[in-house]
C-alpha cells in the first residue's frame, strides 16, 4: 500500500504543469499563509515544533532519494526512501494522542472563532487575578507545611493531564487549598494550570532520572524536575517537610526565600506585564538562579 501511495504521489508530480502565472502565485501565497497561521497558532514554542522540523527533514530526505534514483544511484535512493517510510509510519504511531487531540479540536463548533481569537491569551487583568490566587495559596501552603505541586503549561500535548481528574475550573485559592489538603484523594498528585483554568488535578508526572540529583529532594521535586526536562512546562513546588517554595524550569530548580521574588518570576511565567518600561518574557531563563545538582 505504501509503494502504491508513493507511486501515486510521483504520478501527480509528473503531471504538474510547472509554468506559473499570477493565479498560481496567489494560490502559493494562500497556502503559505495558511501554513504560517497554523504554525503560529499550534506549533510555535511547543514540543510539536521539534516534530515539524523532523517532518521537514524527512521530506527533504525523500526528495534527495528521488534525485539519487534519477542519477541511477538506485540502491542508495531506495534505501533512503525505505528509511523515510518506516520513520514516517513510526511517527504516526508515536504521536497518535496528539493527532487525536488535534482532530478533536478541528471537530469543535467554534473552531474558526478559537483559531483567530487571541483575547484569552492577552487578557492581563485575568492573569493578574490568577497570580493573586496562586500567591495566596502558596503563602498558606508554606506556613502550614502543606505539600503542593502546580504545573503551568499552555501546550497540553505533553502534560499527562488526562491521567488525573479533569476539572476545567477557574483558578481560585479555595479550590487549590481543597485539592492539596492532606485528607483529599487528589493531594498527592499535581495540578495542571493552563491560562486561568485548572485543567486537572491528581496528575502523576514522570520522575527525573538524573543520578546526580541530591538525595534531599523528595518525590514532588523530582516529579517537577522530570516534567520540565521533557516539556516546556514550569512547575511550582511547596515542600511538605520544610515549607520551602521552589520553581522548576528546564530541569533546574530555584528556591525562593520570599514571596516578592516568587511573584516577580510568576509574572514572567504567566505573561503578566506590570510596567511599560520593563517588558517581561514568558519563561525567561535570565531571571532564574538555579540550584546546582549534587
Image (tube, rainbow, N blue to C red):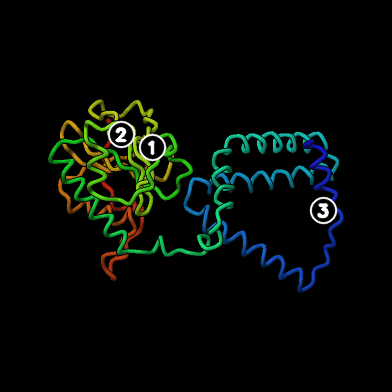
For the residues labelled 3 and 1, say whether their Cβ atoms are less than 8 Å apart: no
Mark 1 and mark 2: Cα distance apart in space: 8 Å
Corner quadrant of residue 6: top right
Q: Residue at x 30, y 50 (%)?
A: 171
Q: Position of residue 120 (x, y in %)?
A: 41, 61
Mark 1 or mark 2: which comes first in sequence?
Answer: 1
Q: Position of residue 70 (x, y in %)?
A: 84, 45
For the residues labelled 1 and 2, say whether their Cβ atoms are less than 8 Å apart: yes
Label 1 environment density (alpha carbons within 10 Å; few <14, some 14–19, many ≥20): some
Q: Where's the N terminus, which quadrant? A: top right
Q: Residue at x 16, y 37 (%)?
A: 243
Q: Residue at x 58, y 43 (%)?
A: 99
Q: Position of residue 124 (x, y in %)?
A: 32, 64
Which residue is farthest bottom? Answer: 22
Q: Residue at x 35, y 48 (%)?
A: 169
Identify whether 248 is placed above or below 265: above
Report the residue marked by disc 3.
Answer: 13
For the residues labelled 2 and 3, say whether their Cβ atoms are less than 8 Å apart: no
User: Of 108 and 138, which appears nearest the observer?
Assistant: 108
Which residue is farthest left? Answer: 143
Mark 2 and mark 3: Cα distance apart in space: 55 Å
Count the labels in the image.
3
Report the residue marked by disc 1.
Answer: 165
Of circles 2 and 3, which is in front? 2
Report the residue marked by disc 2.
Answer: 186
Mark 3 and mark 1: Cα distance apart in space: 49 Å
State whether residue 224 appears in this view.
no
Q: Where's the C terminus, which quadrant? A: top left
Amino acid at each position: 500500500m505504501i509503494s502504491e501511495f508513493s507511486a501515486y504521489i510521483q504520478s501527480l508530480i509528473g503531471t504538474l504543469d510547472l509554468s506559473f502565472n499570477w493565479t498560481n502565485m496567489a494560490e502559493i501565497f494562500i497556502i503559505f499563509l495558511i501554513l504560517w497561521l497554523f504554525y503560529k497558532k499550534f506549533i510555535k514554542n511547543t514540543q510539536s515544533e521539534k516534530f515539524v522540523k523532523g517532518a521537514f527533514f524527512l521530506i527533504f530526505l525523500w526528495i534527495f532519494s528521488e534525485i539519487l534514483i534519477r542519477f541511477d544511484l538506485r540502491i542508495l535512493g531506495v534505501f533512503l526512501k525505505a528509511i523515510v517510510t518506516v520513520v514516517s509510519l513510526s511517527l504516526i504511531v508515536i504521536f497518535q494522542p496528539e493527532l487525536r487531540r488535534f482532530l478533536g479540536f478541528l471537530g469543535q463548533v467554534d473552531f474558526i472563532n478559537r483559531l483567530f481569537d487571541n483575547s484569552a491569551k492577552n487578557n492581563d487583568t485575568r492573569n493578574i487575578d490568577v497570580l493573586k490566587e496562586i500567591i495566596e495559596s502558596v503563602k498558606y501552603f508554606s506556613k502550614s507545611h502543606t505539600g503542593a505541586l502546580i504545573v503551568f503549561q499552555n501546550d497540553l500535548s505533553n502534560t499527562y493531564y488526562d491521567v488525573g481528574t479533569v476539572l476545567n475550573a477557574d483558578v481560585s485559592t479555595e479550590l487549590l487549598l481543597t485539592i492539596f489538603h492532606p485528607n483529599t484523594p487528589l493531594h498527592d498528585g499535581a495540578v495542571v494550570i493552563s491560562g486561568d483554568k485548572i485543567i486537572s488535578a491528581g496528575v502523576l508526572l514522570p520522575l527525573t532520572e538524573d543520578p546526580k540529583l541530591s538525595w534531599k529532594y523528595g518525590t514532588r521535586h523530582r516529579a517537577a524536575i522530570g516534567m520540565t526536562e521533557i516539556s516546556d512546562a514550569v512547575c511550582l513546588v511547596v515542600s511538605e517537610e520544610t515549607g520551602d517554595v521552589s520553581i522548576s524550569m528546564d530541569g533546574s530548580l530555584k528556591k525562593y526565600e520570599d514571596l516578592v521574588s516568587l511573584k516577580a518570576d510568576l509574572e514572567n511565567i504567566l505573561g503578566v506585564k506590570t510596567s511599560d518600561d520593563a517588558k517581561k518574557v514568558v519563561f525567561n531563563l535570565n531571571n532564574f538562579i538555579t540550584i546546582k545538582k549534587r
